[in-house]
Amino acid sequence: MPLKRHLDSGRITVRTVNPAELTAGEFSHIVREAVTAGEARVVVIDSLNGFLDSVPDEQFLTLHLRELLTYLDGRGVATLTVVTQHGLVPDVSHAAVDVSYLADAVVLLRYFETEGRVRQAISVFKKRSGRHERTIRELIMSDRGLEVGPPLAEIAGVLTGATFQGGARAP
């Protein structure tokens, strides 16, 4: 995608936000302004970890986030949120915040190791309405763009980090 051209034309706006300098309420106001004044149709929040840092209590984080996402949904805005994993193989039971119940769809990107290389996997973890594919596939980012490979049928444990290949433990 010719991102620079779209940035130069104003069709895409990127704003860096420092959570130490902005409250969750101030951030929500900026996003609402982008929708009402700037007529944004897609909002990407990368990442929710910064939003979490701006709200000391997780309970208030989910309230702020629910209010913002409800507003954006009511305005017909597609919203993508990113939550950064901590560590190469994170423990999902100890995630910094779980707001997946607010999402209509959750796409999971994970790292895995096989054949001496670190690779990436993609899977649809949740889709609120309708069926979705439940396979885990390799995600390849190259000069040609994004490629989604065939299902990782010979590898087990990609989501947990305890990887097994072909029914036997990977060395």
Image (cartoon, helix red, strand yellow):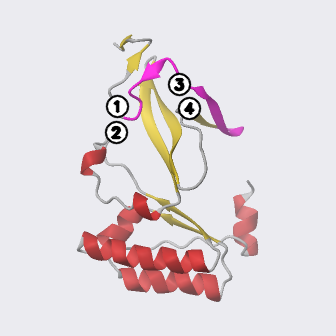
Q: Disc 4 on helix, strand or loop?
A: strand
Mark closer to the observer (2, 3) = 3
| Residue 137 image label | 4
Rounded to the nearest whole Å, what is the CA distance between mark 1 and mark 3? 14 Å
Residue position marked by numbered label 3 in the rendering? 152
How far apart are the alpha carbons under marks 2 and 3? 19 Å
Q: Which residues are magenta?
A: 142-159
Q: Earlier in the sequence, mark 2 or mark 1?
A: 2
Dot 1 and dot 3 residues touching (CB under 8 Å): no
How many residues crowd around disc 1 within 10 Å: few (fewer than 14), some, or many (20 or more)? some
Tag 3's secondary structure? loop
Element assignment for label 2: loop
Q: Is residue 74 left or right of residue 106?
A: right
Q: Which residue: 37% across, 23% down?
A: 163
The answer to whether marks 4 and 2 mark residues whose Cβ atoms lie closer than 8 Å is no
Count every numbered label the image shows and give the total: 4
In-front residue for pair 49/92 = 92
Residue 63 colored in magenta in the image: no
Q: Which residue is mark 2?
A: 88
Q: How many other residues sit within 10 Å of disc 3, few (<14), some (14-19) or many (≥20)?
A: some
Q: Amino acid at mark 2?
A: Leu
Looking at the image, do the residues carrying marks 4 and 3 touch, with CB atoms under 8 Å apart?
Answer: yes
Name the element at disc 1: loop
Marks 2/1: CA–CA distance: 8 Å
Left or right side of 39 for 94: left
The crowd level at tag 4 (other Cα within 10 Å; few <14, some 14-19, many 20+) is many
Residue named by callout 1? 161
- Quadrant including the C terminus: top left
